[in-house]
Amino acid sequence: MFLPAGEKQFEFWVLRRNGLPNINIAKRFGVSRQAVSRALLSMDKRIEETLLEMARANRIEVEKLDSKKGILFGRSVPFKANAIIFVSTKHGMQVWYEHEGECGSCERYRECIELLWDFAEEMQLKLQSTEDPTKIADELFEKLKESIE
């Protein structure tokens, strides 16, 4: 994904997603509030376009999209499963399909746990402690869905 991690626009976007008002972002970077607003509008558009591109590439029908949070909810046509595409500052653009897995025997178990907990932390969401990635994902994505309705 294009995540411009070193660009100010993306830094502004992450700070706003974390709840920092535009005026505080402007003060932190020594720029005008209008410059922050313009940068955020541009970044929102880039995030939305990328989320939609990822949905098309993965054949996911879009149900909800929130470019300010970097989240798209949809349904996978080929897998007949709910799907979420999201922007993680640590892990980049990610696609997650709702599924029941054999997580304990999966070689990517630790990766999934880390991804989900990191994203929950980025989104400032508290999750119940569990060692099953599918249950963590269900809880995380349900809370995210509620937050954009």
Image (spheres, helix red, strand yellow):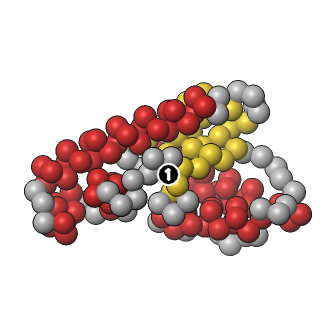
Image location of residue 108, percent across then percent down: 77, 62
Q: Residue at x 82, y 50 (%)?
A: 100
Question: Neighbour class for label 1 at 10 Å: few (<14), some, many (≥20)?
Answer: many
Left or right: 109 with respect to 37?
A: right
Q: Residue at x 70, y 27 (%)?
A: 77
How many badges with numbers are in the image? 1
Residue 33 vertical placement versus 60 (above, below): below
Q: Judging from the image, what secondary structure is the residue with disc 1 in? A: strand
Answer yes or no: is residue 3 visible.
Answer: yes
Dividing the picture into quadrants, the one containing residue 127 is: bottom right
Under mark 1, the amino acid is Val
Image location of residue 67, percent across then percent down: 40, 42
Image location of residue 33, percent across then percent down: 13, 55
Residue, disc 1: 87
Residue that protrudes farthest toward the bottom in the picture: 129
Image location of residue 70, percent across then percent down: 45, 47
Left or right: 98 with respect to 36?
A: right
Q: Residue at x 73, y 68 (%)?
A: 110
Left or right: 18 with respect to 139?
A: left
Answer yes or no: is residue 60 visible.
Answer: no
Q: In terms of depth relative to the viewer, which is nearer, 1 or 121?
A: 1
Dividing the picture into quadrants, the one containing residue 15 is: bottom left
Q: Residue at x 13, y 66 (%)?
A: 30
